[in-house]
Image (cartoon, rainbow, N blue to C red):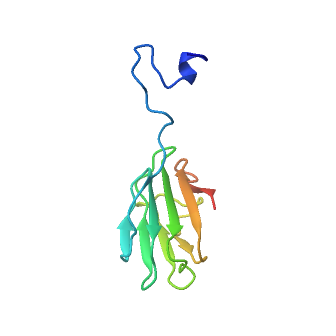
Amino acid sequence: MSGTVGDNIYRASGVIAAAGGGGTSWQTVITGTTHTAVAGEGYFINTTSNVCTLTLPAGAIGNEVSVIDYAGTFDTYNLTVAADGSEKINASTDDLTVATERAGFTLVFTDSTQGWLLKNR
């Protein structure tokens, strides 16, 4: 084997370690009007026939939640992202309204001052 043990998926014992780490656990398509998110999960949200409110989980630093507009209809039937309790989204206690067709983004939790921030858009 070449490289250092830290760079290698093979452990000194010869047991293969999982390559990579973490990642988003994508869920089946959501079509309902409300859903409570779980940290580390990604959601394909279908608002073809109704609006949807996605409530974020209680935040801990580094938690992430990802969302994709499954049917390209957030411009017709908006997605509302609500924080858990008194937590914030982009340093505001206001809900986040997503009205952009084919929107896709990840929110990451920072702290009680900023709350959930957009990691990418």
Task: Work out whether residue 61 or residue 49 is closer to the camera in this orientation and state it.
Answer: 49
Task: Please state, as top left, top right, bottom left or bottom right, where the N terminus lies in the image.
Answer: top right
Residue at point 45%, 75% (across, down): 46
Q: Is residue 117 above or below residue 100?
A: above
Residue 111 position within the rendered picture, expressed as x and y whole percent measured from the top left? 53, 47
Residue 17 position within the rendered picture, expressed as x and y whole percent measured from the top left? 43, 27
Residue 87 position within the rendered picture, expressed as x and y whole percent measured from the top left? 47, 57
Q: In the image, 32: left or right of 76?
A: left
Residue 117 position within the rendered picture, expressed as x and y whole percent measured from the top left? 59, 56
Q: Quadrant of residue 32?
A: bottom left
Residue at point 55%, 77% (across, down): 72
Residue ranking furthest to the top: 12
Task: Please state, as top left, top right, bottom left or bottom right, where the C terminus lies in the image.
Answer: bottom right
Q: Quadrant of residue 98?
A: bottom right
Task: Work out whether residue 41 or residue 84 is closer to the camera in this orientation and state it.
Answer: 41
Residue at point 60%, 77% (across, down): 101
Q: In the image, 7: left or right of 50?
A: right
Total number of numbered labels? 0
Is residue 46 at least partly visible in the picture? Answer: yes
Residue ranking furthest to the right: 121
Task: Work out whether residue 69 or residue 97 is closer to the camera in this orientation and state it.
Answer: 69
